[in-house]
Amino acid sequence: MTDTQNLNFEIETAPAISPLKSDGKVVSMAAAGQWTLIWHKFTRNKVAVFAGCVILLLYLIGAFVEFLAPGVPEKSKPQYTYAPPQQIEFFVPDGNGGSKFLMHVKGYKIEVDPVALRRSFVPDENKIIPIGWFVHGQPYKLWNLIPADLHLIGALDKKDTVYFLGSDRLGRDLMSRLIYGTRVSMSIGLIGVTISLTLGVVMGALSGFYGGWVDLLIQRIVEIISSMPTIPLWLGLAAAIPLTWSPLQVYFVITIIVSLLTWTALAREVRGRFFALRAEDFVTAARLDGSTERRIIFRHILPSLTSHILAVVTLALPVMIVAETSLSFLGIGLKPPVVSWGVLLQDAQSIRTVATAPWLLIWPASAVVIAVLSFNFLGDGLRDAADPYGE
Amino acid sequence: MQPILTENKAMNTTNQTYVHPGLPDEEPILTVQDLSIDFHLRTHILHAVRNVSFNLCRGRTLALVGESGSGKSVTARGLMRINDPAARVASGNIFLDVEGKRIELNALGPNSPQIRAIRGRRIGLIFQEPMSSLSPVHTIGSQIVEVLQLHRHMSLAAAKTETIELLRQVEIADPTNMADRYTFEFSGGMRQRAMIAMALACNPDILIADEPTTALDVTTQAEILDLIKRLQVSRGMAMLLITHDLGIVAEVADEVAVMRYGRVLELGPVDAIFHDARHPYTKELLGSTVRLESGEANADETQRSEKPVLSVSGLTKVFGSNSAWFKKGSYALKAVDSASLDLYPGENLGIVGESGSGKTTLGRLILRTVEPTEGQVIFRPGDGSETDVTKLAKSELRQFHRHVRLVFQDPFSSLNPRMTVKQIIGDPLFVSGVARGKEMESRVGELMEMVGLDPAAMERYPHAFSGGQRQRIGIARSLALDPKIIIADEATSALDVSIRAQILDLLLDIQKRLNLSFIFISHDISVVRYFCDRVAVMHRGKIVEIGSAEQICNAPREDYTKALISAVPNPDPRNKRMLHRTRLTA
Amino acid sequence: MLRYVIKRLIYMIPTLIGMSLIAFMIIQLPPGDYLTSLIASMQDSGQVFSQAQIDAMRETYGLDDPIYVQYFKWISGIVLHGDFGFSYEWNRPVSELIWDRMGATLSVSVASLLFVWAVSLPIGIYSAVRRHSVGDHFFTFLGFIGLAIPNFILALTLMYVAYKYMGLNVGGLYSPEMADAPWSLAKVGDLLAHLWIPVIVIGTAGTASLIRILRANLTDELSKPYVITARAKGLPEHKVLLKYPVRIALNPFVSSIGWVLPNLISGVTITAIVLNLPTAGPLLLRALVIQDMYLAGSFILLMGTLTLVGMLISDLLLALLDPRIRFN
C-alpha cells in the first residue's frame, strides 16, 4: 500500500466511543442552565434523592403534628406508667370460630413478676380496643389557631387511649410526643441555620468588603470560636438562661446559642468560596467589562455561590439538631412542657429506666439518627452536584 | 458528539496507517502490533488506542505526535502496563527483546514480578510535569537511590555514590549537595534533569519521554532536549518521544508516527513525514505549524507618522516591598522594571518572554488590574486627547476599559459557566448601557458572526462549546464595545496547534476589518513572529530589545534574544536549528 | 524550623486571649455576681452576713471594679499564680479541683485519638485503593451511620445493650472497689476494661470523618503523576502505595488533631456525663447547673487551651513530616 498516491483517507472528527447501553440517548444539555445541570447530577445520586424525600416527609410531619398525632402530648394517664407499645391487629374472632376484620389494639393487664415483685403490663387478649382512621379524639388547636379534634389514627372511643409506641413515666403517649417533638427539633435546625447563615454572610461580607484589619479580626474570631470545644461552650451559654424565662423565650435563646457556634463554619466556607471565585478569570473579565463591584457580586459571584451555600447549609442543619438534642438531654436546653426529641431523651437518662422501657430510648434516638443521616446524605449529594461543571 | 463505531468503514476509504518506505530494517527492540486500548467509562467505552503498530530500534528515536486526546500517552503507558484500571488492552501484542529473548509484555500480569523487572530496568519513563511527577516529600536523591537498590541491588552507600554520579551526568551542578534537596527547591529544568537521571539509573534499553519539555521555557527546553538526545545516542537507547510540537519532532526524531483519535494515521521517516506527507490531517497539522514558522515575518519599515495610541514609559511594579511588620522577612521583587514601549494605531505589538519575565504583569499594569508602583501609561484615543491611565479614578478607568480590552489565556475559566453566550458577550454592552434587549441581541448576533460562530447558538451555555469556540466567544466579548486596543494574554497557548492557527487568522482578519491595535503577549515565538509587526523581548522584568518582528527573529542584537530565538525548534528536519544554537552565559 | 515554632507560638497568644475572654464572659453571664451566689449558699447553711461584712467582701473580691479590671485580676491570677478563683460549692480553690479531672479528660481524649487513628488509617487506605468495592461501600455506609449517631445516644445504647445482654453495668472508669485503690497492675487492667466503651463512643464520629477525609485525599493522590513514576520504576504495588501516596495523604491525617481534638473533648464532656466518668464533663455540668461559675469558667478555659496545644502539636508534627511547610 505504499504506492497509493490517491488513497482516500477516512477523516474522523471525534474520538471513537461506544455507548455501554444500546439505548444511550444523548440528552442535549447545550442550553441547560446551572440548576438544570445541578438537578440532573443530583438525581443521579439515588441515596441523596431518597434522603431528600425523608426530610420532606419529616417537615410535613412537623407541619401537621396536631392532626397526625393520635393524642395530645401532655395528656397523662398515671395508671399506664411505662406501658409497652401496642401492636395493631386486623382480625378479631367473630364468635363462630371464624374471624372478621376489625382494626384494633389489645388492652393491658397487669402482671406481677413473682421474683422481683415488679409490676409490668402485658397485652390482654380479651380487651379489644377498636381503632380507625380519621377519628375524633382529644381536641386541639391546629397551629394554635384552628380548634379541631380530628386525628389521622386513634381509638374509636374517645375514652380509650392507644400507645402505639408505648408510654412514659406519667403514662403519656410516646407516639404523640415524638410527633410533636418533630416540629420543635426540625424547626430549631431551620431557624438556627437561618441565623447562622445570616451571621455568616454578614460577617463574611464585612470581611470581604472592608478587608484589611476587619477581615483579620473576623478571621481571628472565627478561628477562636472554631477551636473551642463546642459542647462545653454550649453548656456554658445555655446554663446562663434564667429559669424564669418562658418556654418560647428559651426556645429562641437556645436556637441562637446553637447557631452562635456554627456560623463560623458557614462563614469560613462562604468566604473561601467567595475569594476563590473573585480570583477567577471570568470575574476579572466582568470587571474589565465595566461592571460595578455590586454587579460583580450579585450577577457573577452569588449565582455560583448559591448552590454551594445550599449544600453547606444542609450539612449544618444536623449539627444544630444534635446540639439542641444534646443540650435538652442534659437538662439545660429546652425544658418541659416543650416537647423535643432531646426532651424526650431526657427521660431515658438512667439505665434503669431504659431497661424497663427501652422504647423511651429507641424511638426518639431513631428519630434523631434518621433526621441526621438524611441531612448528611442529602447534603453530600448537594455538595457533589453543586458544581455541575467539574467533570 | 456522534459516536463513531470502529466498524463504520466506507467502501473506498481507508483508516489504515499509511506507512512510508525507508523505515529502519534492523531488528527492533520493541514491537507493537495492532494494539488497541479501551477505557471503560461510566457511560461509554472510549477507544483510546486503535490498532496501533510500530517498532522501536536501538539508538533511534520514534516520535508519537498528535494533539490532545490522540491517545499518544495512553499508548506509551500501555507499553509499561501502567495505565489506570479503567483501561483495558482490547487486542494486540507488545514484544520486548530482553537479552535476545522475546517477551510478550501484555501476557504478563499488570503487577507481576516479571513486568516490574522491566519497568525502570528495561524501560525508563520521563514525564511532562517534573514537579508533580516527583514526590514532594522525599529528597531527589532518595527517589533515585530507590531505583538503584531495586533493580541493581546496590547497597545504600553504593547507590548514593551512583546517584551523585548520575546527577553529574545530567549536568546538575553540585550533585552531592543537590541529592539531599527536595523537588520544590529545584527549578523546572533541574527537576526534569533529576527525572532523567532517575529514568536512566538502570541503563534501560528504551526511554519513553512523554512531553518531556512542554512545561519548560524554550531555552530550558533546548537544553533538556539536547541532554536527552546526547544521552540516548551515547547509550544506544531506543527512544519513544511523545509530543504535540512538530518543531521538537523535526529536531529530535528519526521516525514519526502521527496519531489522531487513537489511530496512527501515518508512519515514516522524519523527512518523509515533513516533506512528503500523505494524510490530510498530517498536512493540516504541518500546515498550521509551518505557516507560523515560514511565513514572512513582518518587516515594518514604514515610518510612523501618527502618534502612538498607547505610550508606556518607565512602568515598574515591585511586589512584596516595605512590609513594616517583619523587617527581616521583607523582600522586594521587581516583576516589571521600568518598561517603556509605544503602540501605534493598527499595529500588532508582541511581548515575548519566558515564564517569570514579567510579560503578563506588564499587560495587567497597562489595564491597571494590577496597580503600578511607578511609571506612566498615556492613552490617545485618536481625538487629540491624552489621558494618563495611572492617574485615573476608578470610574474613569471604566471608560478606559471600554477602549482597551483583554482576551484571556484560559477559555474555560474566563467565561462564566452560569451565563449564556448571549449574556456573556452582551454583558459589556449591558453594563455600559450601549445596547439592551433586542438591540443587544442583534449586536451579539453580529459579533458572533464576526468571530465565526453561529448566532443561533447564543442561548447556549459555554459548556456546550469546545476550547477553540470558547476562545472565539471571549474574542467576541472583547470586541463588543468597539475597542481601540486588545491585549491578548497568551490567547492561543491553551489551544491545540490546528485550532491555534485558526484563532490567529481570525484575530488578524478582525484587526484588518476594524483597524485595531493588538498587544500580543506570548511565550511562543513562532506565534508572535506570525502575528506581530513589532516585538518586545522581556527578560527578568526588563524589556531587553524592541524591534520589528523580522529583525528580532532573523537578526537579534541582544545576547538574550539570540539565545531565545535560536532555542526555538524548527519544524524542518533538513534545517535543524536547536543543536547549533546560541547559548546565553549569564 | 525554630523560627517556625516561635512564629506558631506567637500566633497562639491572641487566640488564647480570645478564649480567656469567652471564658470570662461565661463566668459573668449568669444574673447576679459571684458574691450573691456565695452569700446565698452561706445563708443556706445558716450563716448570716451584715451589710458591712458584705461590703468588705465586695471590696476584697473587687466586684465593684470596672469589668476590665475584674478580667485583668482574674487572668493575671491564673497566669501568675495558677489561681483560678474559688468554688463555693466545694468550698475549695478551683485549682485544687480541676487538675485531676482535666488529667482524666486528657487521657480519655488521647486514648480516643489513638483509637481513631488506629481504625481509620487502614480502613481509609483500603477504601481508597479498593474504591467502589463491596468493602468500601460497607465502610462508607458504616461511616455515615457513625457520623449520624450523637455520642450520648451511642453511649446510652451501648450501656443498654451491655446491661440487657451481658448483665454489665458499664458506667465509670473503674469498678467501685478499684476507684480509690492505689495504682497497680490490676487497676490499670480494670481501667482498660472500662475504657473501651467511652473510647468507642467518643471515637466513632471522628473515625468516620477521618476515613472519609483519608479516602478522599488518597483518591486524589492516587491519580497524581508521581504515583505513575513510582510504578514505572518497577516498585511492587504495595510499596508504591505506602511509600508515596499514603505517605503524602498522611499529612492531613496528622493535622487532623487540630479539629478532631476539639470534637473529642466535646465528645468526652457529654459522654462522661452519660457514662459517669471522673472527667471534667460531669463536674462542669454540675458547676453550670448550680452556677458555680469560677469552676465552670476554668474548665472551659482549660479545655480550650488543651485544643490549642493539640493544634500546635499537630502543626509541628506536620512541619516535621512535610518539608514544604518546614522550608517556607
Image (cartoon, coloured by chain):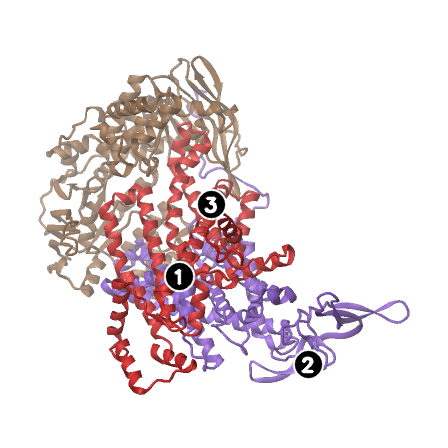
Left or right: where B426 falls relative to B363: right
Colour in which the image shows chain C: red
Q: Is residue B374 above or below residue C242?
A: below
User: Label 2, on which residue?
Assistant: A137
Residue at left offset 41%, top offset 34%? B70
Q: Is residue B70 above or below residue C174?
A: above
The image quadrant of residue B533 is top left
The amino acid marked with disc number 3 is Ala
2 vs 3, front mark: 3
Chain letter for the part of the structure drawn in purple? A
Q: Chain of mark 1?
A: A
The image quadrant of residue A66 is bottom right
Report x, y in % for residue B164. 26, 25
Is there a contact, CB below 8 Å, between mark 1 and mark 3?
A: no
Label 3 crowd (10 A; few <14 / some 14-19 / many >=20) = few
User: Label 3, on which residue?
Assistant: C118
Residue at left offset 57%, top offset 57%? C158
Chain letter for the part of the structure drawn in brown? B
Q: Are marks 1 and 3 on the same chain?
A: no
Work out which quarter of the rendered image holds the C terminus of chain B and state it. top left
1 vs 2, front mark: 1
- Residues C38 and B16: in front is C38
Is there a contact, CB below 8 Å, between mark 2 and mark 3?
A: no
The amino acid marked with disc number 1 is Pro
User: Label 1, on which residue?
Assistant: A229
